[in-house]
Image (spheres, grey):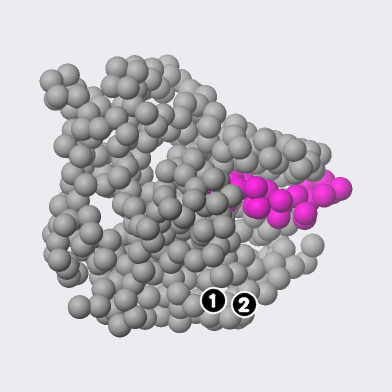
Amino acid sequence: MDSTFVEKILTKYSNNKEVVPSQIVTVKPDHLLKHDNTAAIIQKIQPELNNYGVYSKTLPIIVLDHVIPAASEKTATNHKIIREFVTNHDIKNFYDVGYGVCHQIVIEKGLALPGILILGSDSHTCSYGSIGAFSSGIDRTEAACLLLTGETWLKVPNSIKMNLNGKLKPNVYAKDVILHIIGDISSAGANYCSVEYHGDTSQFNIDDRFTICNMGVEMGAKNAVFLVDNVTTKYLSSIKISASKYRPIYPDKDACYSQELDFSLNEMEPMVACPHTVDNVKPVSDLKGVEIQQCLIGTCTNGRLSDLKIAADILKNKKINSRVRLLILPASKDIYENALKDNTIEILLKSGGTILPPGCGPCLGAHQGCLAPGERCISTANRNFKGRMGCKDAEIYLASPATVAASALKGKITDPREV
Ligand code: SF4
Protein backbone atom coordinates (compact mmCIF):
# COMPACT_ATOMS: atom_id res chain seq x y z
CA MET A 1 0.00 0.00 0.00
CA ASP A 2 1.30 3.48 -0.83
CA SER A 3 1.75 5.55 2.31
CA THR A 4 1.97 9.18 3.38
CA PHE A 5 4.86 10.61 5.40
CA VAL A 6 3.17 10.04 8.74
CA GLU A 7 2.03 6.52 7.87
CA LYS A 8 5.59 5.61 6.90
CA ILE A 9 7.22 7.05 9.99
CA LEU A 10 4.66 5.54 12.38
CA THR A 11 5.03 2.18 10.62
CA LYS A 12 8.76 2.35 11.26
CA TYR A 13 8.50 3.45 14.90
CA SER A 14 5.75 0.98 15.80
CA ASN A 15 7.49 -1.99 14.11
CA ASN A 16 4.40 -2.72 12.04
CA LYS A 17 4.33 -3.82 8.39
CA GLU A 18 1.95 -0.97 7.67
CA VAL A 19 -0.39 1.35 9.54
CA VAL A 20 -3.66 3.04 8.55
CA PRO A 21 -5.37 6.24 9.74
CA SER A 22 -7.09 5.91 13.15
CA GLN A 23 -5.00 2.87 14.12
CA ILE A 24 -3.51 3.11 17.60
CA VAL A 25 0.22 2.40 17.66
CA THR A 26 2.84 2.27 20.40
CA VAL A 27 6.04 4.17 19.67
CA LYS A 28 9.38 4.83 21.30
CA PRO A 29 10.33 8.42 20.38
CA ASP A 30 13.93 9.53 19.98
CA HIS A 31 13.43 12.52 22.24
CA LEU A 32 10.99 14.01 24.71
CA LEU A 33 11.11 17.80 24.91
CA LYS A 34 10.30 19.53 28.17
CA HIS A 35 10.80 23.05 29.48
CA ASP A 36 10.01 24.86 32.72
CA ASN A 37 6.99 22.57 33.10
CA THR A 38 9.43 19.73 33.89
CA ALA A 39 9.07 20.58 37.58
CA ALA A 40 5.35 19.79 37.42
CA ILE A 41 6.04 16.58 35.46
CA ILE A 42 8.64 15.15 37.81
CA GLN A 43 6.52 15.98 40.84
CA LYS A 44 3.75 13.76 39.38
CA ILE A 45 6.04 10.73 39.36
CA GLN A 46 8.48 11.35 42.21
CA PRO A 47 8.05 7.93 43.92
CA GLU A 48 8.51 6.07 40.61
CA LEU A 49 11.53 8.19 39.74
CA ASN A 50 13.06 7.38 43.13
CA ASN A 51 12.50 3.64 42.52
CA TYR A 52 13.27 3.24 38.82
CA GLY A 53 14.91 6.44 37.53
CA VAL A 54 14.33 7.80 34.02
CA TYR A 55 14.02 5.45 31.03
CA SER A 56 17.03 6.99 29.29
CA LYS A 57 19.40 9.88 30.03
CA THR A 58 19.38 10.93 26.39
CA LEU A 59 15.61 10.79 25.82
CA PRO A 60 14.72 14.09 27.57
CA ILE A 61 15.65 17.48 26.19
CA ILE A 62 15.06 20.07 28.90
CA VAL A 63 15.28 23.79 28.19
CA LEU A 64 14.58 26.55 30.71
CA ASP A 65 12.98 29.21 28.56
CA HIS A 66 9.44 30.14 29.55
CA VAL A 67 10.02 32.42 32.52
CA ILE A 68 13.69 33.29 32.48
CA PRO A 69 15.44 34.69 34.42
CA ALA A 70 13.06 33.56 37.17
CA ALA A 71 10.38 36.19 37.81
CA SER A 72 9.30 35.07 41.29
CA GLU A 73 10.17 32.76 44.16
CA LYS A 74 7.82 30.18 42.62
CA THR A 75 9.52 30.14 39.20
CA ALA A 76 12.99 30.21 40.81
CA THR A 77 12.01 27.17 42.91
CA ASN A 78 10.76 25.35 39.80
CA HIS A 79 14.06 26.01 38.06
CA LYS A 80 15.94 24.73 41.14
CA ILE A 81 13.88 21.52 41.22
CA ILE A 82 14.65 20.95 37.53
CA ARG A 83 18.40 21.54 37.95
CA GLU A 84 18.50 19.05 40.83
CA PHE A 85 16.59 16.50 38.71
CA VAL A 86 19.02 17.00 35.83
CA THR A 87 22.01 16.45 38.12
CA ASN A 88 20.53 13.50 40.01
CA HIS A 89 19.52 11.65 36.82
CA ASP A 90 22.51 12.70 34.73
CA ILE A 91 20.26 14.15 31.97
CA LYS A 92 22.43 14.76 28.92
CA ASN A 93 20.43 17.38 26.97
CA PHE A 94 19.89 20.24 29.41
CA TYR A 95 19.92 23.93 28.46
CA ASP A 96 19.74 26.32 31.38
CA VAL A 97 18.51 29.94 31.43
CA GLY A 98 19.92 31.98 28.56
CA TYR A 99 20.26 29.41 25.75
CA GLY A 100 16.97 30.36 24.12
CA VAL A 101 13.50 29.07 23.25
CA CYS A 102 13.21 25.27 23.44
CA HIS A 103 12.14 24.72 19.81
CA GLN A 104 14.94 26.88 18.47
CA ILE A 105 17.45 24.99 20.62
CA VAL A 106 16.24 21.58 19.39
CA ILE A 107 16.79 22.63 15.77
CA GLU A 108 19.97 24.64 16.32
CA LYS A 109 21.72 21.93 18.34
CA GLY A 110 20.93 19.31 15.69
CA LEU A 111 18.64 17.29 17.98
CA ALA A 112 15.89 17.20 15.34
CA LEU A 113 16.87 15.16 12.29
CA PRO A 114 15.02 14.01 9.18
CA GLY A 115 13.05 10.82 9.71
CA ILE A 116 13.12 10.81 13.51
CA LEU A 117 10.24 11.04 15.99
CA ILE A 118 10.13 13.67 18.75
CA LEU A 119 7.34 14.33 21.22
CA GLY A 120 7.21 17.22 23.64
CA SER A 121 5.09 18.65 26.41
CA ASP A 122 4.64 21.86 24.44
CA SER A 123 2.12 22.36 21.66
CA HIS A 124 4.61 23.94 19.25
CA THR A 125 6.78 20.82 19.22
CA CYS A 126 5.36 20.43 15.71
CA SER A 127 8.10 22.89 14.59
CA TYR A 128 10.62 20.13 13.76
CA GLY A 129 8.71 19.13 10.65
CA SER A 130 10.78 21.95 9.16
CA ILE A 131 13.70 19.49 9.20
CA GLY A 132 11.66 16.48 8.04
CA ALA A 133 11.06 14.96 11.48
CA PHE A 134 7.71 13.81 12.86
CA SER A 135 7.13 15.92 15.94
CA SER A 136 4.09 16.63 18.03
CA GLY A 137 2.94 18.01 21.35
CA ILE A 138 1.64 15.76 24.12
CA ASP A 139 0.27 16.62 27.54
CA ARG A 140 2.22 16.64 30.78
CA THR A 141 0.80 13.39 32.15
CA GLU A 142 1.77 11.52 28.98
CA ALA A 143 5.20 13.15 29.16
CA ALA A 144 5.57 11.98 32.76
CA CYS A 145 4.81 8.35 31.75
CA LEU A 146 7.10 8.61 28.73
CA LEU A 147 9.94 9.78 30.96
CA LEU A 148 9.64 6.54 32.96
CA THR A 149 8.77 4.00 30.26
CA GLY A 150 10.24 5.47 27.05
CA GLU A 151 7.08 4.67 25.10
CA THR A 152 3.61 6.01 24.45
CA TRP A 153 0.71 5.55 22.06
CA LEU A 154 -0.41 7.63 19.09
CA LYS A 155 -3.43 7.46 16.83
CA VAL A 156 -2.32 7.45 13.18
CA PRO A 157 -3.55 10.76 11.71
CA ASN A 158 -5.19 11.33 8.36
CA SER A 159 -2.90 13.24 6.00
CA ILE A 160 -3.58 16.53 4.21
CA LYS A 161 -1.49 17.50 1.20
CA MET A 162 -1.05 21.26 0.87
CA ASN A 163 0.39 22.41 -2.45
CA LEU A 164 2.17 25.78 -2.22
CA ASN A 165 2.23 26.93 -5.82
CA GLY A 166 3.92 29.95 -7.41
CA LYS A 167 6.27 32.52 -5.95
CA LEU A 168 5.80 34.99 -3.12
CA LYS A 169 5.82 38.68 -3.97
CA PRO A 170 8.34 41.02 -2.25
CA ASN A 171 7.42 41.90 1.36
CA VAL A 172 5.25 38.80 1.69
CA TYR A 173 6.77 36.20 4.00
CA ALA A 174 6.34 32.71 5.40
CA LYS A 175 4.33 34.16 8.29
CA ASP A 176 1.86 35.63 5.81
CA VAL A 177 1.59 32.23 4.12
CA ILE A 178 0.72 30.36 7.29
CA LEU A 179 -1.69 33.09 8.44
CA HIS A 180 -3.36 32.93 5.03
CA ILE A 181 -3.69 29.12 5.25
CA ILE A 182 -5.09 29.20 8.80
CA GLY A 183 -7.50 31.98 7.84
CA ASP A 184 -8.66 29.86 4.90
CA ILE A 185 -9.16 26.52 6.60
CA SER A 186 -9.86 27.76 10.19
CA SER A 187 -8.24 26.88 13.50
CA ALA A 188 -9.89 23.45 13.36
CA GLY A 189 -9.29 22.87 9.65
CA ALA A 190 -6.54 20.28 10.12
CA ASN A 191 -7.69 18.77 13.42
CA TYR A 192 -5.58 15.73 14.31
CA CYS A 193 -4.20 15.57 10.77
CA SER A 194 -0.68 15.33 9.45
CA VAL A 195 -0.02 18.26 7.09
CA GLU A 196 2.49 17.70 4.28
CA TYR A 197 3.72 20.73 2.33
CA HIS A 198 4.36 20.14 -1.38
CA GLY A 199 4.75 22.32 -4.47
CA ASP A 200 7.20 25.19 -4.88
CA THR A 201 8.77 24.72 -1.46
CA SER A 202 12.40 25.30 -2.44
CA GLN A 203 11.89 29.08 -2.05
CA PHE A 204 11.39 28.53 1.69
CA ASN A 205 14.56 28.31 3.76
CA ILE A 206 14.66 26.47 7.10
CA ASP A 207 13.66 29.62 9.00
CA ASP A 208 10.57 29.98 6.79
CA ARG A 209 9.69 26.29 7.15
CA PHE A 210 10.15 26.59 10.92
CA THR A 211 7.62 29.46 11.03
CA ILE A 212 5.11 27.53 8.90
CA CYS A 213 5.44 24.21 10.79
CA ASN A 214 5.46 26.00 14.17
CA MET A 215 1.92 27.23 13.51
CA GLY A 216 0.63 23.84 12.31
CA VAL A 217 -1.00 23.33 15.68
CA GLU A 218 -2.90 26.61 15.22
CA MET A 219 -5.00 24.85 12.58
CA GLY A 220 -5.27 21.76 14.80
CA ALA A 221 -2.63 19.64 13.03
CA LYS A 222 -0.96 16.77 14.86
CA ASN A 223 2.20 17.49 12.90
CA ALA A 224 3.30 19.48 9.86
CA VAL A 225 6.24 18.63 7.62
CA PHE A 226 8.35 19.86 4.73
CA LEU A 227 9.94 16.97 2.86
CA VAL A 228 13.72 16.82 2.96
CA ASP A 229 15.43 18.50 -0.02
CA ASN A 230 18.60 20.44 -0.81
CA VAL A 231 17.48 23.25 1.50
CA THR A 232 17.33 20.80 4.42
CA THR A 233 20.61 19.06 3.68
CA LYS A 234 22.43 22.37 3.20
CA TYR A 235 21.11 23.65 6.52
CA LEU A 236 22.08 20.45 8.33
CA SER A 237 25.54 20.52 6.86
CA SER A 238 25.86 24.19 8.00
CA ILE A 239 25.40 22.94 11.59
CA LYS A 240 27.90 20.12 10.95
CA ILE A 241 25.46 17.24 10.51
CA SER A 242 26.42 15.02 7.61
CA ALA A 243 23.90 13.11 5.48
CA SER A 244 25.18 9.82 6.95
CA LYS A 245 23.58 10.78 10.29
CA TYR A 246 19.96 10.68 9.09
CA ARG A 247 17.54 8.86 6.81
CA PRO A 248 14.77 11.05 5.37
CA ILE A 249 11.28 9.65 4.93
CA TYR A 250 9.21 10.51 1.85
CA PRO A 251 5.57 9.76 1.07
CA ASP A 252 4.84 7.35 -1.78
CA LYS A 253 3.73 8.82 -5.09
CA ASP A 254 0.21 7.36 -4.87
CA ALA A 255 -0.28 7.87 -1.14
CA CYS A 256 -3.86 8.51 -0.07
CA TYR A 257 -4.70 11.94 1.41
CA SER A 258 -7.93 12.85 3.15
CA GLN A 259 -7.70 16.30 1.48
CA GLU A 260 -5.54 18.01 -1.12
CA LEU A 261 -5.50 21.81 -0.96
CA ASP A 262 -3.90 24.29 -3.37
CA PHE A 263 -2.60 27.72 -2.41
CA SER A 264 -1.37 30.36 -4.87
CA LEU A 265 1.62 32.05 -3.30
CA ASN A 266 1.80 34.76 -5.96
CA GLU A 267 -1.65 36.02 -4.92
CA MET A 268 -0.84 36.29 -1.21
CA GLU A 269 -0.63 39.61 0.64
CA PRO A 270 0.78 40.58 4.05
CA MET A 271 -1.75 39.20 6.54
CA VAL A 272 -2.71 39.91 10.17
CA ALA A 273 -4.51 37.63 12.65
CA CYS A 274 -6.89 39.82 14.65
CA PRO A 275 -8.09 39.35 18.24
CA HIS A 276 -8.82 36.88 19.73
CA THR A 277 -8.31 33.85 17.47
CA VAL A 278 -5.51 32.91 15.11
CA ASP A 279 -7.94 32.22 12.26
CA ASN A 280 -9.46 35.71 12.40
CA VAL A 281 -7.16 36.71 9.54
CA LYS A 282 -7.41 39.83 7.37
CA PRO A 283 -5.12 41.47 4.79
CA VAL A 284 -3.05 44.19 6.46
CA SER A 285 -4.65 46.72 4.10
CA ASP A 286 -7.99 46.20 5.95
CA LEU A 287 -6.42 47.20 9.27
CA LYS A 288 -4.43 50.24 8.28
CA GLY A 289 -4.57 52.91 10.96
CA VAL A 290 -5.41 50.68 13.95
CA GLU A 291 -3.34 52.24 16.76
CA ILE A 292 -0.98 50.04 18.76
CA GLN A 293 1.02 50.56 21.93
CA GLN A 294 3.42 47.60 21.87
CA CYS A 295 5.28 45.66 19.16
CA LEU A 296 7.00 42.32 19.69
CA ILE A 297 9.49 40.76 17.29
CA GLY A 298 10.70 37.34 18.40
CA THR A 299 9.47 34.02 19.90
CA CYS A 300 9.83 30.50 18.48
CA THR A 301 7.73 31.61 15.49
CA ASN A 302 9.77 34.58 14.25
CA GLY A 303 12.80 35.24 16.47
CA ARG A 304 15.52 34.08 14.11
CA LEU A 305 18.33 36.16 12.63
CA SER A 306 16.55 36.44 9.28
CA ASP A 307 13.49 37.86 11.11
CA LEU A 308 15.55 40.40 13.05
CA LYS A 309 17.31 41.44 9.84
CA ILE A 310 14.01 42.00 8.02
CA ALA A 311 12.97 44.31 10.87
CA ALA A 312 16.37 46.03 10.92
CA ASP A 313 16.17 46.72 7.18
CA ILE A 314 12.92 48.61 7.77
CA LEU A 315 14.08 50.40 10.92
CA LYS A 316 17.63 51.36 9.86
CA ASN A 317 18.37 55.04 10.56
CA LYS A 318 14.78 55.59 11.70
CA LYS A 319 13.05 55.96 15.06
CA ILE A 320 9.99 54.05 16.16
CA ASN A 321 6.87 56.06 16.97
CA SER A 322 7.17 57.73 20.38
CA ARG A 323 3.88 56.21 21.59
CA VAL A 324 5.07 52.64 20.93
CA ARG A 325 7.25 50.15 22.82
CA LEU A 326 9.23 47.77 20.59
CA LEU A 327 10.40 44.55 22.25
CA ILE A 328 13.00 42.43 20.48
CA LEU A 329 13.35 38.83 21.57
CA PRO A 330 16.08 36.76 19.88
CA ALA A 331 15.07 33.10 19.86
CA SER A 332 18.48 31.92 21.07
CA LYS A 333 21.82 33.05 22.40
CA ASP A 334 23.48 32.07 19.10
CA ILE A 335 21.02 34.26 17.18
CA TYR A 336 21.63 37.11 19.63
CA GLU A 337 25.41 36.78 19.18
CA ASN A 338 25.14 36.73 15.40
CA ALA A 339 22.79 39.72 15.44
CA LEU A 340 25.35 41.58 17.57
CA LYS A 341 28.15 40.70 15.17
CA ASP A 342 26.37 41.93 12.05
CA ASN A 343 25.04 45.12 13.72
CA THR A 344 21.40 44.05 13.53
CA ILE A 345 21.02 44.54 17.28
CA GLU A 346 22.64 47.98 17.09
CA ILE A 347 20.17 49.08 14.40
CA LEU A 348 17.21 47.80 16.41
CA LEU A 349 18.49 49.43 19.62
CA LYS A 350 19.11 52.76 17.92
CA SER A 351 15.63 52.73 16.43
CA GLY A 352 14.25 52.59 19.97
CA GLY A 353 13.91 48.83 20.53
CA THR A 354 14.39 47.09 23.87
CA ILE A 355 16.31 43.80 23.68
CA LEU A 356 15.06 41.01 25.94
CA PRO A 357 17.02 37.87 26.93
CA PRO A 358 16.65 34.87 24.57
CA GLY A 359 13.58 32.96 25.71
CA CYS A 360 9.80 33.10 25.56
CA GLY A 361 9.60 36.55 27.14
CA PRO A 362 6.18 38.22 26.85
CA CYS A 363 4.76 35.55 24.51
CA LEU A 364 2.92 33.71 27.28
CA GLY A 365 2.09 36.73 29.44
CA ALA A 366 4.00 35.58 32.52
CA HIS A 367 6.48 38.47 32.70
CA GLN A 368 8.41 41.02 30.57
CA GLY A 369 6.06 43.11 28.48
CA CYS A 370 2.63 42.19 29.81
CA LEU A 371 -0.13 44.40 28.41
CA ALA A 372 -2.45 46.78 30.26
CA PRO A 373 -6.26 46.90 29.80
CA GLY A 374 -7.22 48.61 26.54
CA GLU A 375 -3.73 48.23 25.00
CA ARG A 376 -3.00 46.67 21.63
CA CYS A 377 0.11 44.73 20.68
CA ILE A 378 1.19 43.60 17.23
CA SER A 379 3.42 40.56 17.56
CA THR A 380 5.28 37.96 15.50
CA ALA A 381 4.22 35.21 17.94
CA ASN A 382 1.79 32.41 17.17
CA ARG A 383 -1.13 33.03 19.55
CA ASN A 384 -3.44 35.97 20.15
CA PHE A 385 -5.90 34.42 22.59
CA LYS A 386 -7.62 36.64 25.13
CA GLY A 387 -5.22 37.13 28.05
CA ARG A 388 -2.27 35.52 26.26
CA MET A 389 0.02 38.46 27.04
CA GLY A 390 -1.14 38.83 30.61
CA CYS A 391 -4.31 40.93 30.26
CA LYS A 392 -7.73 39.73 29.12
CA ASP A 393 -8.76 43.27 28.25
CA ALA A 394 -5.88 43.81 25.81
CA GLU A 395 -5.75 42.92 22.11
CA ILE A 396 -3.05 40.98 20.23
CA TYR A 397 -2.55 41.07 16.46
CA LEU A 398 -0.21 38.55 14.78
CA ALA A 399 1.88 39.41 11.74
CA SER A 400 5.26 39.04 10.02
CA PRO A 401 8.39 40.80 11.33
CA ALA A 402 8.12 43.23 8.39
CA THR A 403 4.56 44.22 9.27
CA VAL A 404 5.45 44.56 12.97
CA ALA A 405 8.51 46.71 12.20
CA ALA A 406 6.54 48.93 9.81
CA SER A 407 3.81 49.29 12.45
CA ALA A 408 6.39 50.23 15.11
CA LEU A 409 7.53 53.10 12.89
CA LYS A 410 4.04 54.50 12.41
CA GLY A 411 2.45 53.65 15.78
CA LYS A 412 -0.40 51.95 13.96
CA ILE A 413 -0.85 48.81 11.90
CA THR A 414 1.01 49.47 8.66
CA ASP A 415 1.49 47.65 5.40
CA PRO A 416 5.26 46.93 5.09
CA ARG A 417 5.06 47.70 1.37
CA GLU A 418 4.45 51.35 2.28
CA VAL A 419 7.69 51.98 4.22
FE1 SF4 B 1 5.46 28.78 23.57
FE2 SF4 B 1 5.79 31.38 23.00
FE3 SF4 B 1 7.76 30.01 24.15
FE4 SF4 B 1 7.11 29.56 21.62
S1 SF4 B 1 7.97 31.45 22.45
S2 SF4 B 1 7.55 27.99 23.18
S3 SF4 B 1 4.87 29.83 21.68
S4 SF4 B 1 5.73 30.45 25.04
The three-letter code of the residue at mark 2 reads Lys
- Indicate whether residue 256 is drawn in magenta: no
Quadrant including the C terminus: bottom right
What residue is at 26 percent from the left and 66 percent from the top? 8
Q: Is residue 142 above or below residue 69?
A: below
Image vertical order of residue 69 relative to residue 398, above or below: above
**Residues packed near mark 2 inside 10 Å, few (<14), some (14 to 19) or many (20 plus):** some
Please report the bounds of the magenta region as a residue range.
Answer: 296-321
Displayed quadrant of residue 21 = bottom left
| Left or right side of 108 for 336 | right
Q: Quadrant of residue 187?
A: bottom left
Which residue is found at the position 31% from the left and 59% from the top?
A: 222
Q: Which residue is mark 1?
A: 200
- Describe the element under mark 1 as helix, strand or loop: loop
Total labels drawn:
2
Rendering coords of residue 332 (x, y %): 57, 38
Q: Does the residue at mark 1 contact the one at mark 2 (Cβ under 8 Å)? A: yes
Q: Tell me the tag on residue 167.
A: 2
User: Disc 1 residue type?
Assistant: Asp
Name the one closer to the observer, 199 or 344.
199
Q: Earlier in the sequence, mark 1 or mark 2?
A: 2
- Whether residue 303 is in magenta: the answer is yes
Q: Residue at x 40, y 53 (%)?
A: 246
Q: Position of residue 209 (x, y in %)?
A: 51, 60
Residue 144 visible in the picture? no
414 vs 315, left or right, is left
> Horizontally, is 32 left or right of 407 in the view?
left
Q: Quadrant of the N terminus?
A: bottom left
Q: Is residue 227 visible in the rendered structure shown here?
A: yes
